[in-house]
Amino acid sequence: MRVTRWRGEGQVGLVRESEQGVSQTAHLSRREFLDRLGLSAILLGLGSLVAAAARFLVPAVELSEPTRATSVRPDELKAEEPVFVAENRAWLLRDDAGIYALSAICSHLGCTVRWETGAFGCPCHSSRYDSYGRVQHGPATRALAALWVGLDKEGRLVVDRSRTVPPSARLMG
């Protein structure tokens, strides 16, 4: 079977010649061709959009076992100067009531929040949290988790990611 391209007035088609020499013509008008091309482009775009939207349903990070991390001594922690505890992605802070820890994991998609002059900001989707971890504006809808803080035998602060506490909990010091 031999296939040759055929062009006519406003039409593009293929001519198929069988072994018997009988020609079979498949006509596709320019309009039909452009309609199919447009539909293909729309379906490809929608498929990409669905794939991108599905990506947002999966958290950006997975943590291993909860950990305890030792950090600075209480007297080294100053008000309005939080200390980042990288081992378990937490922030240590001090206010008038005492010392507290907040998870550094954004409640929206799991990015690590940064301290930005009096508040925490998520670099991924611009969520903002105040210094107590409460949402100032989204897309995050939940506050940063408050974590347990204690002292080790040497008097250094310990943050335990496996133990959440009420946001008002403080270590006196």
Image: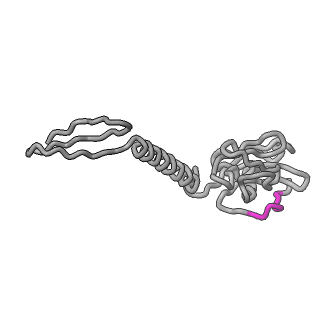
Q: Who's the residue at 66% across and 44% down the image?
A: 124
Q: Who's the residue at 35% across and 36% down the image?
A: 9
Q: What stretch is highlighted in magenta?
A: 165-171
- List the single residue furthest toward the bottom: 166
Q: In which quarter of the image is residue 68?
A: bottom right
- List the single residue furthest toward the front: 9
Q: Quadrant of residue 15?
A: top left
Query: x, y percentage for residue 27?
Result: 31, 45
Left or right, 11 with respect to 108, comes to left
Query: In the rendered image, which quarter contains the N terminus?
Result: top left
Query: x, y percentage for residue 6?
Result: 27, 36
Left or right, 68 with respect to 149, comes to left
- List the single residue furthest toward the right: 96
Q: Quick check: 145 above or below 12?
A: below
Q: Who's the residue at 19% across and 43% down the image?
A: 16
User: Colour scheme in the image?
Assistant: one colour
Q: Quick check: 160 above or below 117?
A: below
Instruction: Pick whichever, 91 or 4, lies toward us.
Output: 4
Left or right, 26 with respect to 117, comes to left
Instruction: Pick whichever, 35 or 80, lies toward us.
Output: 35
Taken as a whole, is the magenta stretch helix, strand or loop? loop
Query: x, y percentage for residue 132?
Result: 82, 53
Is 140 contained in the magenta span? no
Query: x, y percentage for residue 61?
Result: 57, 51
Instruction: Pick whichever, 156 or 19, lies toward us.
Output: 19
Is 168 contained in the magenta span? yes
Q: How many marks?
A: 0
